[in-house]
Image: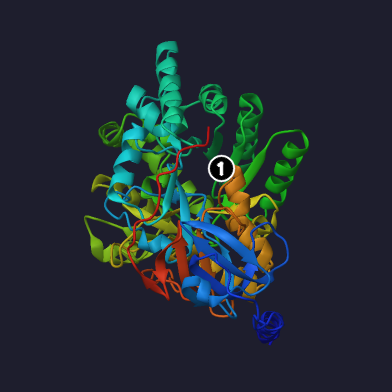
């Protein structure tokens, strides 16, 4: 009943903006596309309004509250009852398959027109050559990149569990500087992953200062998001303060039942830091499950030196017992969620029949469902070449609380994907429509204006992109048109390979990449480089 009332109110609000008939003379100005009679949510957070939006030569040239003449346009789109917004900006995207999937269908169908890649400390190096290659292919979306600390550290130090020498640190600083010259928007770290987990705060500060000198930002996959979450947030804030660099706590969340509700404290830390002059923001995906490699359940110290060193450690009975004990602890208290059923396999190259099934299912087939048996299966998975998994370990209360915070942007943490490829997290297909359908329309966690602001202008300003992120005259025509009544994600944890509904049109630089719900595979996107 509540949802019906919300929908009725939304329909009435849209209907109240009915389009009048123009009696003006036809002007000399010509438009490539006229989006007529839509409800503009401009991205600033301001109230929606009815307007016509005209596009010419890849730019928004008119936003008129008075109707524009249809005869002035090569093509007219009737947007009655539809929302017209700036294209969505994905603040955390895994673009590794970009050179293989340059059309980026799984993103553009969500309304995404710009994506920030290179998160969690991993990025292409050298970055300039990669961006040149991507642009030469032609892109379905605009692509911005971060330079990754983990990639740089591994190039310089391998998987060594120690501090860098002065020479090694200088070399890493030089690689960050080169990445920034190549157009990176900042530095990313994955302090939970190898080899970033072996770095100390001082090392990250030194590298972040280099990015700051070029006007970059710092995005951090925190060192811990479970039991060590508070210390992880504190470290990111300290790096921002000491390096004098804007910080993004990326895919912010509280992992594991012992930490559910901890977002109350982490958000207070963000507010306190901002009051003290540290520029801290967050991005978030709208799901209660995470996604990463199965080795996240293994203590980092056991993985130092790579797989061969890990397997040698397992040959020592006492060390193997200690490693298994640590995995058991993580299964009970951290990424395992206290139940083998909460670990769902997503990609298992050596045994595809496990994809979509759980660690518990595998344990059943082996005849032992104890947590310790599960821990030994984690080791077996790594021995066979590793696996990726979905971890159902977040609380809805934290998701909604973080989403409401005014400094939270939206980022999918999704990877470009083709239908049928593995068993991915549904966020790869549904992040942005899910915010609009579930958290705006169904739950009312955000207003439509708030949600669009978090998906567009807020993110554009974080990246220093002054030419996009809003519906305004003179800006790049990255535009999405969607139905606020029907927009929704369709991808589920059981059936993830499903495109969303309700996204009618998406333009990138004025070229339709989604046209009346159809993916066009046009390639108008740009490899963006950080504004100088």
- Please determine whether, in this image, residue 177 is positioned above or below residue 306: above
Query: How many marks are shown on the rendered structure?
Result: 1
Looking at this view, name the residue that lies furthest to the right.
275
- Front in this rendered view, residue 256 or 195: 195
- Front in this rendered view, residue 278 or 44: 44
The residue at the point 56 percent across, 42 percent down is 463
Q: In this view, does 78 lie to the left or right of 375?
A: right
Say what secondary structure mark 1 lies in.
helix
Instruction: Where is residue 532? Give x, y as percent.
Output: 53, 32
Q: Can residue 13 be seen in this view?
A: yes
- Front in this rendered view, residue 396 or 131: 131
Q: Is residue 228 visible?
A: no
Instruction: Where is residue 486? Give x, y as percent.
Output: 54, 80
- Please determine whether, in this image, residue 128 is positioned above or below residue 326: above
Instruction: Where is residue 315? Give x, y as percent.
Output: 26, 35
- Please determine whether, in this image, residue 122 is positioned above or below residue 37: above
Give the colour scheme of this rendering: rainbow
Q: 10 Å neighbourhood of mark 1: few (<14), some, or many (≥20)?
A: some
- Front in this rendered view, residue 478 or 377: 478
Q: Is residue 41 left or right of residue 481?
A: right
The residue at the point 60 percent across, 62 percent down is 62
Residue wearing tag 1? 463
Res 239 quadrant in image: top right
Looking at this view, name the residue that lies furthest to the top.
166
Instruction: Where is residue 329? Give x, y as percent.
Output: 49, 47
Q: In which quarter of the image is the N terminus?
A: bottom right
């Amino acid at each position: 009943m509540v949802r019906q009332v919300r929908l009725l109110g939304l329909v009435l609000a849209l209907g109240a903006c009915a389009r009048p008939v123009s009696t003006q003379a036809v002007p000399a100005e010509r438009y490539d596309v006229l989006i007529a009679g839509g409800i503009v949510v401009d991205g600033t957070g301001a109230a929606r309004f009815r307007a016509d939006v005209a596009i010419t030569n890849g730019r928004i040239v008119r936003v008129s509250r008075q109707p524009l003449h249809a005869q002035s346009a090569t093509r007219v789109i009737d947007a009655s009852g539809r929302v017209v917004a700036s294209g969505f900006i994905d603040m955390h995207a895994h673009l590794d398959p970009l050179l293989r999937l340059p059309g980026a269908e799984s993103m553009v169908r969500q309304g995404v027109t710009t994506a920030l890649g290179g998160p969690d400390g991993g990025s292409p190096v050298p970055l300039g050559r990669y961006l040149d290659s991507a642009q030469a292919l032609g892109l379905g979306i605009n692509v911005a990149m971060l330079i990754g600390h983990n990639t740089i550290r591994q190039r310089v130090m391998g998987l060594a569990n120690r501090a860098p020498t002065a020479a090694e640190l200088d070399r890493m600083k030089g690689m960050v500087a080169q990445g920034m010259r190549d157009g990176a928007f900042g530095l990313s770290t994955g302090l939970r992953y190898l080899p970033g987990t072996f770095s100390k705060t001082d090392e990250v500060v030194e590298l972040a200062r280099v990015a700051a000198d070029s006007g970059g930002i710092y995005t951090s996959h925190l060192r811990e998001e479970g039991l060590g979450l508070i210390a992880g947030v504190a470290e990111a804030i300290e790096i921002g303060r000491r390096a004098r660099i804007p910080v993004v706590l990326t895919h912010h969340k509280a992992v594991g039942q012992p930490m559910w509700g901890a977002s109350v404290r982490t958000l207070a830390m963000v507010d306190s830091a901002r009051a003290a002059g540290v520029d801290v923001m967050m991005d978030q995906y709208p799901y209660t499950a995470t996604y990463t490699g199965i080795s996240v359940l293994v203590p980092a110290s056991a993985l130092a030196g790579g797989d061969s060193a890990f397997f040698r450690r397992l040959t020592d009975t006492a060390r193997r017992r200690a490693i298994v004990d640590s995995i058991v602890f993580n299964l009970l208290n951290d990424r395992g969620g206290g139940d083998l059923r909460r670990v769902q396999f997503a990609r298992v190259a050596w045994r595809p029949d496990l994809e979509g099934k759980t660690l518990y299912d595998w344990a059943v087939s082996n005849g032992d469902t104890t947590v310790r048996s599960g821990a030994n299966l984690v080791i077996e998975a790594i021995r066979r070449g590793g696996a990726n998994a979905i971890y159902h370990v977040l609380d809805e209360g934290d998701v909604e609380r973080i989403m409401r915070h005014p400094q939270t942007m939206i980022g999918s943490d999704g990877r470009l994907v083709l239908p049928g490829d593995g068993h991915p997290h549904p966020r790869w297909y549904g992040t942005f429509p899910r915010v609009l359908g579930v958290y705006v329309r169904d739950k009312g966690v955000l207003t439509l204006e708030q949600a669009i602001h978090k998906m567009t202008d807020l993110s554009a300003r974080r990246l220093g992109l002054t030419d996009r992120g809003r519906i305004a005259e003179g800006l790049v025509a990255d535009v999405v048109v969607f139905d606020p009544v029907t927009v929704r994600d369709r991808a589920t944890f059981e059936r993830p390979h499903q495109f969303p509904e309700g996204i009618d049109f998406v333009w990138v630089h004025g070229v339709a990449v989604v046209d009346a719900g159809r993916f066009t595979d046009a390639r108008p996107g740009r490899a963006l480089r950080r504004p100088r």
